[in-house]
Image (spheres, rainbow, N blue to C red):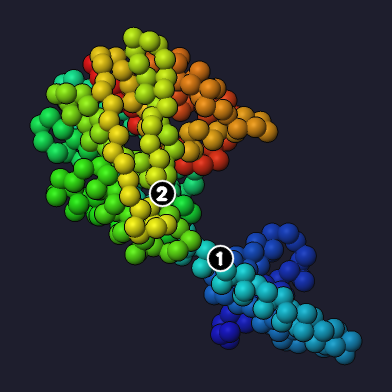
Amino acid sequence: MTRGLEAEYVQILRDYLDSQEEDELYGAQKLGKFLLRRDISPEEMVDLHGRALEKLGDVPEFVRASFRILTEVMIEYGNAQRSLNSWRSKHAQLQSEVAVASAMQQALLPQNMPTYPSVEIGAISIAAHEISGDYYDFMYVDEHQFSLTIGDITGKGIPAAMCMSMLKYAVDSLGEIRLGPDQMLRHLNRVVERNIDASMFVTMLFGCYDTQSHVFRYAVAGHEPGFLYRAQEGRFYDLAGSGVALGIDGNSQYKEQEVHLQIGDLLILLTDGVTECKLGRSYMTREELISNLQHEVHLPSQNMVDQIYRRLLMLTQFEQRDDYTMIVLKRI
């Protein structure tokens, strides 16, 4: 601690003891903020105060002795303060890294929906926390076809963001080979199984939509069943398909499924953050979810996914417990 600082403190102490006016405390407050910025420890401050008293006059021996006790107390207090400051610094650094990871993750998600004259596409993906474990993407195939994928990565935080990045580039690379949905999942399964921690896995649906035939071919790897809405019947059906999640067994096989859409029909693909909304003490059933979907089927696809999210958020009293992703394809 510099002599100039010590002299300033002596002057502040003298002025206050002479006047004992509250206005004199303002200088002490400014000095306190300066000492905090300089990271002056509590025990150093106690020592400074003791030396300042010595310069102002004789100090009784019992007061000197009390300062020795106070210094020992402040040493432990200072150690705790330094530990807290270190934790705060590390926390701030981690928050900064999470913010960067979140921004990178958002950049991996599609910024624009594919546009085709005979199909409407709507999508929404809302993270429960800073970084999402949900993943979705659309891939242009040709002027009449596009592929899509929707998945859910176990775990949260930076490991999930890293896994999403790996999936994104793996899907993009494999997409150039024009693999069928079942083949795509087999290749992705080997990529995931070799490159992520054994405690993690990925559920996924990968599909390809033909806008001329309006046939949707897809395969499922342990992912949440979506819905097929038949407009003529006014009825919802569960999408067929099952399979082992990616990353569990490198030799898993996947079966391709196929559905044909008529005008007005909907495909609703989602993650378990949609189906596992909690209403009070119980989880929403698929029948309750279908009832809520039924109210919005008349809307354009993007309006539909937005409105369903708002509806479910209100039902759960604005408490989103898990990442939420929904894609709607509508033949028009």
Give 51 or 113, whichever is nearer the viewer. 113
Give amino acid for label 2.
Val
> How many numbered callouts?
2
Instruction: Look at 87% across and 90% down and name the residue there.
Output: 61
Is label 1 in a helix, a strand or a loop? Answer: helix
Q: Which residue is mark 2?
A: 244
Is residue 27 visible in the rendered structure shown here? no
Q: For residue 268, what is the image quadrant?
A: top left
Give amino acid for label 1.
Arg
Instruction: Look at 15% across and 45% down and name the residue there.
Output: 178
Is label 2 in a helix, a strand or a loop? Answer: loop
Task: Give the answer, above or below, for where 276 lies relative to 178.
Answer: above
Q: Which residue is mark 1?
A: 88
Location of the C terminus (image quadrant): top left
Q: CA distance from mark 1 to mark 2?
A: 42 Å
Question: Residue 195 in the image: x percent, y percent?
Answer: 34, 64
Q: Sort mark 1 into few (<14), some (14-19) or many (20+) by Cα contacts within 10 Å.
A: few
Task: Give the answer, above or below, for where 267 lies relative to 96.
Answer: above
Question: Residue 115 in the image: x percent, y percent?
Answer: 18, 28
Question: Residue 58 in the image: x percent, y percent?
Answer: 82, 88
Question: Residue 33 in the image: x percent, y percent?
Answer: 59, 66
Instruction: Look at 34% across and 64% down and name the residue there.
Output: 194
Q: Sort mark 2 into few (<14), some (14-19) or many (20+) by Cα contacts within 10 Å.
A: many
